[in-house]
Image (cartoon, rainbow, N blue to C red):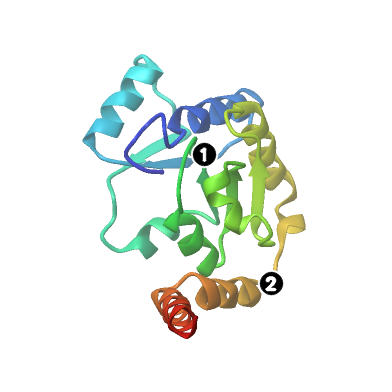
Amino acid sequence: MGWEFYRKGVDLVIDACKILHDKGYDFKTVINGNDTTQEIMDAYLKGTHCDFLQFQEPQYNRNDFFDLSPVFVMASRSETFNYGIAEASYLGKYVITSDIHGVSWCFNLPNVHIFKSESAVDLAALMEEYLIHSEKWRFDKEYVTQYILDHYTDAAWSKALIELYNNEKKE
């Protein structure tokens, strides 16, 4: 989720989780961040302990983080490019993301589900949909993995830059 509590929408995720918890769902959400994130989260919760939330320090091995859940939630209020979405997609995870412009590159991927930015209610609705109907969320993991490899790796970006430079030389 990131280290900037409000920009990354950690408050929205917490509020969405509270909605689901109040409806009686049994689940766990991992909040990834640093010491500052933990402090802000504790202040936001005002001392309330939430069994459905688990705080975790950043992992050296990203796979350890992504192995915790089949769903990656990105609730950011602003981004330019979110590597977490690309990484989760590459690994075959479902992604729930806010509808902000900076992540519009992923909106057409079949593993991506979009909620209205700033809306914990919309986020909770998508999370609930997954909890109830995860079988309806199936997608072609090989297609998504290949798409990420073809468009969002250092090799793909290098190739695009070389093509750009070569085209500039011709003009």
Out of 110 and 107, give the one closest to the viewer: 107
Task: Tell me the tag on residue 122.
Answer: none
Q: In the image, residue 85 lies at what x, y percent?
A: 50, 56
Quadrant housing the N terminus = top left
Query: Which circle marks residue 75 in the picture?
Result: 1
> In this rendering, would 62 be left or right of 113?
left
Residue 27 lies left or right of residue 8; in this view the side is right
Q: Residue at x 42, y 76 (%)?
A: 161
Q: Quadrant of residue 123?
A: top right
Q: Secondary structure at mark 1?
A: loop
At x 58%, y 53%, the residue is 95
- At 43% from the left and 37% from the top, the residue drawn is 8
Q: Position of residue 93 (x, y in %)?
A: 56, 61
Look at the numbered disc 2 and give the secondary structure of its residue: loop
Is the residue marked by circle 2 packed among few (<14), some (14-19), or many (20+) residues within 10 Å? few
C-alpha span from label 2 to label 1 = 24 Å
Q: Is residue 55 left or right of residue 137?
A: left
**In the rendered structure, which amino acid carries the disc numbered 2?**
Asp
Instruction: Reply above or below: 121 against 140.
Output: above
Mark 1 Cα-neighbour bin, 10 Å: few <14, some 14–19, many ≥20: many
Q: Earlier in the sequence, mark 2 or mark 1?
A: 1
Q: Position of residue 115 (x, y in %)?
A: 65, 39
- Give the residue at mark 2: 140
Residue at (32, 18) in percent of width and height = 43
Q: Are marks 2 and 1 in contact (CB under 8 Å)?
A: no
